[in-house]
Amino acid sequence: MKNKTIYHPDYALIIVIFVLLLFGILVQASVSAIFAQEKFGKPTYYLFHQLSWGIVPGVFLAFFAFKINLSFFKKWSWIFILINLILMTLVLVPGIGIISGGAPRWLNFGFFTFQPSEFLKLTFIIYLSAWLAERNKKVLSRDRKKNWQITLLPFLIVVGIIAFLLARQLDLSTLIIILATAGLIYFSAGTPLWHSAFLFLLGLAITYFLIRFTPYRLKRILTLINPLYDPMGFGYQLKQALIGIGSGGIFGVGLGLSSQKFGFLPQTMSDSIFAIFAEEVGFIGASFLVIAFLFFFWRGFKISKGSSDKFSQLFAIGMTSWICLQAFTNIGAMIGIIPLAGIPLPFISYGGSHMVAELIGVGILLNISKSSAK
């Protein structure tokens, strides 16, 4: 009698996700208490909100994504992206979309708000992975010299629609993350090299156009080049972030003892949370966080390499690229090596939409890891 093969998820990946979520809870408990006390009279309000509307539903949906057959995601990938694009369009409709910080990016469902662009990162990875896996089969049976007609051209059309919607929402940072992730998936699908070279140059041209002719984006670049440029305006956030990180030293000032969170550094619960984390735990703690994301990168690509089907390989590459690109973009902006991005730090920053989307993606990645070579 043969022994039944037991498939199990990547336990190392589960551990690193648990560590990242724990870091997020600890730093949110420190940062959010002040604002929660001032606004609601309850220092734990934002922390419990993050748990009840972000982490708990995210873990539940991640478990669902882990248990369901992967064919479900491949079969309905076009429905996921279609619904997401409809929601992205509704954000731009006056009276339906919520404008915050001068940008229309949220939908209000009464008892909670929802940011469709955060889920677009996930649904586009699912759709693109399924679509390219299927296109790969068709191209093999056709003239490869003409495969741009069934691969590159449709890819550009879909990306163009997404780019248009995100540009209307003034969300260049999310657009760059999505374009970079999509480009890596497209390259990994075995498409001709000239396709990827063309997409890279096109992406650079679009990014240059969006920055060059938008004053506030151009000022972010000037601030990066010269941190003293407009120190009380566009350079203020970077200046305060560097002060916070520098104040942390080697070992940090201690959990809950950050001074920058007392109104000095903007967006401390979301975009700037790494600076607060580094101030409280120091260089050692911040380095451990970076190592955790690097470990996530290693496990994700190992899962991709061990996957038996094209969809699983491409999704694992896309999911891993998304999380790591976003993490290091956020961290890089806080230490002044890239322009301020305005995107959350995965698994750490406050916000339910990005947390749920990231955890669902992790659930699918763990689902893939069950059948991957260990």
Image: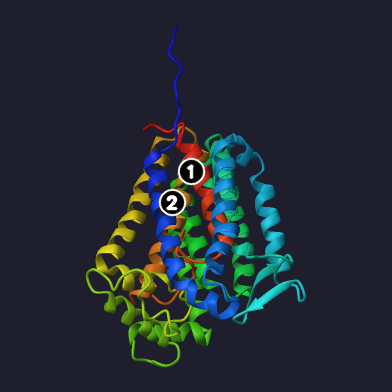
Question: Which residue is the site of mark 1?
Answer: 365
Residue 60 placement, left or right of 87: left
Quadrant (top left/top right/bottom left/bottom right) for the C terminus: top left
Give the CA distance from mark 1 to mark 2.
Answer: 9 Å
Quadrant that contains the N terminus = top left
Residue 267 horizontal side relative to residue 23, left or right: right
Q: Is residue 371 above or below residue 118?
A: above
**For the residue marked with disc 2, what is the amino acid?**
Thr
Which mark is on residue 320?
2
Q: Is residue 310 above or below residue 51?
A: above
Residue drawn at 62 percent across, 73 percent down: 169
Give the x, y percent position of residue 283.
25, 68
Q: Describe residue 89's horizontal placement relative to residue 211 as left or right.
A: right
* Percent position of residue 238, x then y: 38, 82
* Most foreground residue, 156 or 353: 353
User: Residue 55: x and y, percent?
Assistant: 54, 55
Is residue 241 in view from this perspective? yes
Secondary structure found at label 2: helix
Question: In the image shown, does 332 or 78 lie closer to the viewer?
Answer: 332
